[in-house]
């Protein structure tokens, strides 16, 4: 059947096209699927017509059992079959998760612990890179052809760490994707709120990284965004960078951006599955890259049958954006280096 492929609300960083597309039959796993991001992310993926099988993977100590989330989602009137898998916190996924991961086409990983006040960034990296490594090394064994979408902080360091270890196994780095879509979603929404332009007309690429000043929205490359007065851009830029902090404050320390993150993660997940299904979809993502002198960078990425098919150049920047890019590069370089150092000291289990 003829299908119009379009991202919900906005084709940001993306394309709208008409294609003769038959829905795919893909297997997807959400690791941390019973958590604050994982539950709504699992629901959104179960609703994707390209998903035939969904695995909800979490720990036995999760507040809600993974099997319970799966039972709940199994009642949605979609074609997707849903199954829950629970593992003890000391279990090695590479030893236990064979059934769950074998045959997966996409593994989404909203996992890890939040940064505690005053916690050293390297301590957080060691903890969360360890959590990510447990999963990604199991993917390398059981589903080496799967695309692995990482929502594990600090993304700027964790993605390079996982990708370098993935490459040490002789596997394709085009399968490892850092999910930065929430920055794009926020930039689009804020431009819409300022201008009143239809969401479908707003498309702000966001490049760089996925934390603080490394997040660089390119308002000048958006047909609507470039009409904003120049004196409004620095505050709007900062608003995109600080949006997560606003949510944490509004939740009064009882949570972070879970629902919007799930929405953004599902949007990236849907783009990956569309690509695997032979449709051409472009989104911004943080991947191995040659578009700057840094080995990892977020820019527009086209997804295809192998995962990341094309990493697009950053395009023309105005003077403000050029200054911001110059300032963020050393910050991002240091955070990437932390991930590269982790990968030098660690290897995936056999």
Image (cartoon, rainbow, N blue to C red):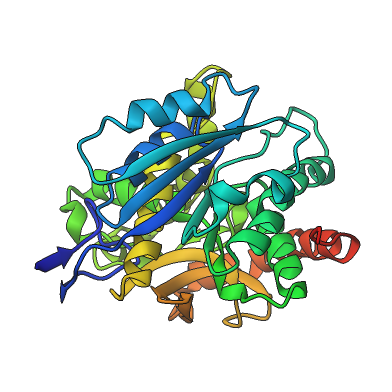
Residue 24 lies, in percent from the top left, at: 29, 63
* Image quarter of residue 22: bottom left
Q: Is residue 77 above or below residue 318?
A: above
Q: Is residue 63 above or below residue 301?
A: above
- Which residue is depicted at the point 73% across and 48% down? 95
Report the front residue among 133 and 105: 105
Q: Quadrant of the N terminus?
A: bottom left
Horizontal arrangement in the rendering, residue 106 relative to residue 342 (left or right): left
Residue at the right extreme, as displayed: 345
Report the front residue among 117 and 98: 98
Residue 236 lies, in percent from the top left, at: 42, 49
Report the front residue among 345 and 185: 345
Residue 257 lies, in percent from the top left, at: 48, 34
Q: Is residue 214 above or below residue 255?
A: below
Report the front residue among 117 and 284: 284
The image shows a total of numbered marks equal to 0
Q: Is residue 225 visible?
A: yes
Q: Is residue 235 above or below residue 179?
A: above
Q: Quadrant of the C terminus?
A: bottom right
Residue 235 lies, in percent from the top left, at: 46, 47
Residue at the left extreme, as displayed: 2
Horizontal arrangement in the rendering, residue 108 relative to residue 338 (left or right): left
């Amino acid at each position: 059947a003829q299908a119009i492929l379009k991202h919900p609300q906005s084709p940001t960083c993306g394309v709208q096209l008409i294609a003769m597309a038959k829905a795919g039959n893909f297997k997807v796993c959400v690791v941390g699927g019973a958590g604050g991001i994982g539950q709504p992310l699992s629901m959104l993926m179960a609703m994707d017509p390209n998903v035939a099988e969904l695995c909800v993977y979490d720990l036995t100590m999760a507040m809600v059992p993974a099997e319970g989330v799966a039972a709940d989602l199994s009642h949605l009137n979609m074609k997707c079959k849903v199954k829950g898998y629970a593992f003890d916190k000391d279990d090695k996924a590479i030893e236990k998760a064979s059934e769950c991961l074998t045959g997966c086409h996409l593994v989404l990983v909203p996992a890890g612990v939040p940064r505690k006040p005053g916690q050293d960034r390297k301590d957080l990296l060691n903890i969360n890179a360890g959590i990510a490594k447990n999963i990604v090394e199991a993917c390398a064994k059981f589903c080496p052809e799967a695309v692995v979408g990482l929502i594990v902080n600090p993304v700027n360091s964790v993605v390079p760490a996982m990708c370098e270890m993935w490459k040490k196994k002789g596997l394709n780095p085009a399968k490892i994707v850092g999910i930065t879509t929430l920055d794009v979603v926020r930039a689009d929404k804020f431009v819409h709120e300022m201008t009143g332009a239809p969401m479908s007309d707003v498309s702000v690429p966001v490049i760089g990284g996925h934390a603080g000043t490394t997040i660089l929205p390119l308002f000048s490359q958006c047909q609507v965004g470039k009409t904003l007065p120049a004196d409004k851009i620095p505050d709007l830029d900062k608003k995109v960078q600080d949006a997560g902090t606003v949510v944490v404050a509004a939740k009064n320390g009882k949570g972070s951006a879970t629902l919007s993150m799930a929405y953004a993660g599902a949007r990236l997940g849907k783009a990956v599955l569309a690509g695997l299904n032979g449709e051409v979809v472009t989104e911004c993502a943080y991947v191995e890259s040659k578009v700057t002198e840094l080995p990892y960078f977020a820019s527009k990425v086209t997804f295809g049958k192998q995962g990341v098919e094309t990493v697009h150049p950053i395009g023309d920047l105005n003077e403000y954006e050029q200054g911001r890019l110059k300032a963020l590069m050393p910050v991002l370089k240091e955070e990437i280096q932390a991930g590269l150092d982790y990968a030098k000291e660690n290897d995936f289990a056999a």
